[in-house]
Image (tube, rainbow, N blue to C red):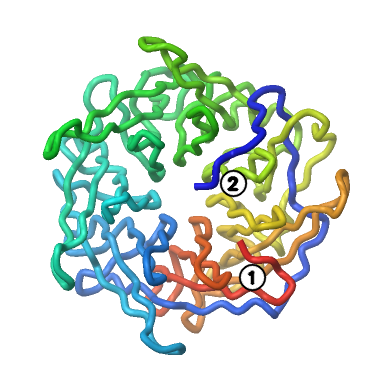
Amino acid sequence: MQPLVRFVPALLGITLLAPRAFPQTGAATLHTLYSFTGKGGDGELPYGGLTVGANAKLYGTTVFGGASGTGTVFELDPPAAPGGTWRESVLYSFGGGADGANPYGTMVFGSNGALYGTTATGGAANEGVVFELAPPADPGGVWTETILHDFGSPGDGANPFGGLIFGGNGKLYGTTFSGGVADSTCYGGQCGTVFALGPPMVAGGAWTEAIVYAFPEGKFGSNPPAGVLIGPGGFLYGVTVYGGGGGDGTIFYLRPPRTAGDEWTETILYSFGSTLGSGWFPRGNLVAGKDGTLYGTTSGGSGTVFRLETPGYWIESAYDFPFAVGYESYGGVVIGPNEQLFGTAFEGGIVSQSCGNLGCGTVFVATPPPSSGGTWSGTMLHTFTGVNGDGANPYAGLAPGPNGVLYGTTVAGGASGFGTIFALTLPPGVRRP
C-alpha cells in the first residue's frame, strides 16, 4: 500500500463529497468477464472485492456455492488474445467445517505467493478463521489451504467480515465483527475486535494471534465490518458500523504501544450521527490521499462519500447521493492520481425491472474542485441493469488493474443471477487510479 504522509491524527473534520450533480456518460465501457453459475462446484455471490495478481489474473471469493455450498476461492485468467474469453477456476471450495465457511473479505497476497483471507463462519468454534491458500509447486497442481487461526475462544474475536493487511513486521492485521467484550450497547451483545496475527518464529511453527483492541462498549464504536489501514508509526485506522457518540458508527485510529507491555489506545476521529446529514453506517475500507486525508463511504440512508481531514475543512452542510447516482455505498472508494474517488453503489441508478424500484446499482467517480472550498463534480460511469448478462448490486469496491481498467464484482445479475465479475474501461479525460 502507499504510505500515508503528513497525517495529523487529531482534531479532524468530516466533509461529505457527493457533488451537486452526477451526469451519466456513455463513454465508459463495462464488460462482464464472468457470470457465476452456482452449478458444478462453481461459486455464488461474490461479496468480497478482487485482488489483482501477476499477469492481470483476478482472485476473489464467493460467500456461497462450491462443492459444499459454503463458498469458494476463485481465479479468473485473462484471454490469450484480445477479445477472447476469460477463464474461471475454483481454487478451493470451503467444506463448511474446520476449514472455514462463507468468506466475505478481500484477500491479500503474501511475499510467498500465497493468498491470505478470512471466513465469517466455520472453523473449530464455527466463528470464522484466518486461512492461507498456497499455490501448487507445479503448474496445474492443487492449491493447499492452511488454517492460521480459529476464532471463538473466550475473549477472542468472532466472525471476521473484512479483509487482511500485512504490516511491515510480517504480521497480518484485521478485524472481527463480533466477539471480544460482551456489552448490551453493542450489536448482538458483542463489540468486536482488531487483531494481529504474527508469523511463525521457526519454519513450520504456528501463527500467533493477539487482540490489538477489543471495543469495550458502544460509545467507543462497535462491530468493525471492514479491515484496517496502516499509517505512519504503525497506527491502525478503521471504521465501526455502529456505536460512537452519535450511535451510527465511527472512524477511529489505534496508537501502538510506546513501550513493551503497554496497550494499544483508541481515539475516535469522528462519530457518525453526531452531525445532521453526515451519513451513517460506514462499512467499507478507508483509503488515504497524498496529504493523509481519509476517504470512505456510508451506507445509511441514501449513502454518502466522505473525507476526514485536518482543521480548516469542517463541514457546515452535507450532501447525500441522489438516487440517479446510486443508493447505499458499501465498498468504499479507490483513489486516483488527482484525488478522484471511484466507487460503487449497491442500488440506485436507472430503475430496472430485474431489481425493482431501488435500481441495480452504479459505478461512479467523484472529482475534487480545482480550488479549495469549491464544489466536487462527478460522473456516473455505469448503471447496472441485471438483464442481458449485465450484473446487479455491486457490494464490494473496485480494484485498479493494468491500463487503467477498474475491476469489480456484483452479487446479483449475470447469466444465472448469482453475480458477475466485470471490467470497466474509463472514458477519455477521466484520470486512472
Residue 381 visible to an observer of this rendering: yes
Which amino acid, mark 1?
Val
Residue 237: x percent and y percent? 53, 33
Residue under label 2: 299
The residue tagged 1 is 351
- Amino acid found under the numbered disc labelled 2: Ser
Depicted 328 relative to depicted 231: above or below: below
Left or right, 19 with respect to 354, comes to right
Classify mark 1: helix, strand or loop: loop
Q: Quadrant of residue 259?
A: top left
Q: Is disc 2 placed on a helix, strand or loop? A: loop
Residue placed most toward the observer, 73 or 384: 73
Q: Position of residue 198 (x, y in %)?
A: 28, 32
Query: Which is more foreground, mark 1 or mark 2?
Result: 2
Q: Residue extending furthest left?
A: 204
Up the image or down, 180 lies above or below 362; here it is above
* Quadrant of the rendered image containing residue 323: bottom right
Q: Earlier in the sequence, mark 1 or mark 2?
A: 2
Give the label on residue 397, or none.
Answer: none
Is residue 140 found left or right of 199 in the rendered image? left
Q: Is the C terminus in the top left, top right, bottom left or bottom right quadrant?
A: bottom right
Determine the residue positioned at 44% across, 21% down.
215
Q: Quadrant of the rendered structure where residue 300 is?
A: top right
